Amino acid sequence: MNAENNDPAADREPAAPIRKRRGWWSRNWLWFVPVLLAALIVFAAGWAYWSFFGRVYCLTEYRTAMEKIVGSEQLRAELGAPIEAAGWPPPSYRFDERERDVRWNVAGPNGRAKAHVLAKLMRGKWEFVILEVALPNGEKVSLVEELGGMAPPPPFQGAPPASDQPKTDAPPPVIDMPTPDVQVPERL
């Protein structure tokens, strides 16, 4: 017998090459990349919405108006309960240093309506001038009277009416001005 024939390993087939196990990325990239992109798009859209309209939702006037709208019996009968601010379309607003004008949609189980708040800075305090909700049937519900403690706009403090001015018998002033001599060129 040969020494070569006595080796039991020689009778076996050659072993298959050992394959390295694939890493996590190579197994999962096909689903991970689209999910990551979708999450980034949703995050960016949310950030953009909040950066443009988030300051409206933080206004004291907006919050007070929503409390009055939710608490109104007439609106709950018309729109149903609960009444919430509709997220879309986003609120429209106009702010300056003495005035805040906000319009947004509210929705209940029975329908949607448009809310409008106009607040002005009067005597150092923000006061509601308009707080109304326009219902789908065209009716407008004003809630500004329900805001206890909010003062009406101050009266106009301009010039007194002409009837209150003292009457005088003096003639109106005479304006006697010489007309200037102006040379107009002739046309050809």
Image: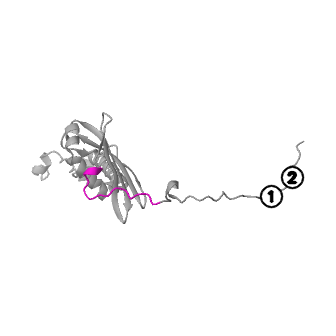
In the rendered image, is residue 58 in sight?
Answer: no
The first of marks 2 and 1 along the sequence is: 1
For residue 178, which numbered disc appears in the image? Answer: 1
Q: Secondary structure at mark 2?
A: loop
| Cα distance between the residues tagged 2 and 1 | 16 Å
Residue denoted by label 2:
183
Few, some or many residues within 10 Å of mark 1 (<14, 14–19, 20+): few
Question: In the rendered structure, which amino acid carries the disc numbered 2?
Answer: Gln
Residue most extreme to the bottom: 124
- Please say which color scheme the image uses: one colour
Residues drawn in magenta:
144-157
- 182 vs 58, nearest the viewer: 182
Q: What residue is drawn where x is 13% and y is 46%?
A: 12
- Quadrant that contains the C terminus: top right
Residue drawn at x 38%, y 62% as measured from the top left? 122
Of badges 2 and 1, the one in the foreground is 1
User: Measured along the vertical axis of the image, is residue 30 above or below residue 164?
Assistant: above
Label 2 CA crowd tier, 10 Å (few <14, some 14–19, many 20+) = few
Mark 2 in CB contact with mark 1 (< 8 angstroms): no
* The image quarter in which residue 82 lies: top left
Name the spot of residue 149 as percent of width and height, x first. 26, 59
In front: 80, or 120? 120
The residue located at (19%, 38%) in the rendering is: 77
Residue 164 magenta-highlighted: no
Q: Secondary structure at mark 1?
A: loop
Residue 32 image position (x, y, % from top left):
27, 48
Q: Which mark is residue 54?
A: none
Residue at the spot 37% in from the left edge and 65% down from the top edge? 123
| Dot 1 amino acid type | Pro
Q: Position of residue 29 (x, y in %)?
A: 28, 48
